[in-house]
Amino acid sequence: MMLERMAYDISHGLMHGMTGAKAYWKAIDLILTKPEFLLAVTAIVLMETVEWAHEHYSMQKIMEQCPGWLRWLSYYALCTAILVFGVFGHNQFIYFQF
């Protein structure tokens, strides 16, 4: 609930001036560092952009029309992102907690 309230206040502050958002940077610093926060925001924006493009365009047709080098570059970028940001460990499966 606290995170939802912070997200609302930050987005409200961004839309109506930075005064509301500045108050929550300290609260965000308790949860995420600024680079982690910027990475999370960038990932969310990228995800929403891809989702919007998927609704309006056929991604398969777009990828088929791209030159081969650009297509393979995107495949390698995706694989690299999975390797860099993925969590690979011997953690218990999350649903075993419930």
Image (tube, rainbow, N blue to C red):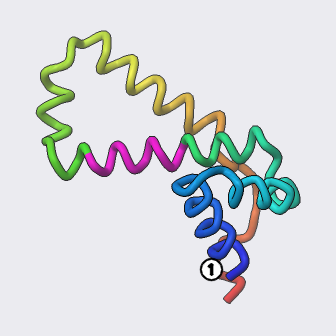
Amino acid marked by disc 1: Tyr
| Crowd rating for badge 1 (residues with CA inside 10 Å; few <14, some 14–19, many 20+) | few
In the image, which residues are magenta?
43-52
1 sits to left or right of 76: right
Image position of 22 with respect to 27: above or below: above
The residue wearing badge 1 is 95
Q: Nearer the viewer, residue 62 or 28?
A: 28
Residue 67, position as x, y percentages in the image: 21, 12
Residue 35, position as x, y percentages in the image: 75, 38
74 sits to left or right of 17: left
Residue for point 71% across, 55% down: 19
Residue 49 lies in the magenta-colored region: yes
Q: Quadrant of residue 58?
A: top left
Residue 36 lies in the magenta-colored region: no
Residue 36, position as x, y percentages in the image: 74, 44
Q: Quadrant of the N terminus?
A: bottom right
Q: Quadrant of residue 60?
A: top left
Residue for point 71% across, 47% down: 37
94 sits to left or right of 14: right
Helix, strand or loop for the magenta stretch, by majority: helix
Image position of 45 with respect to 16: above or below: above
Image position of 4 with respect to 11: above or below: below
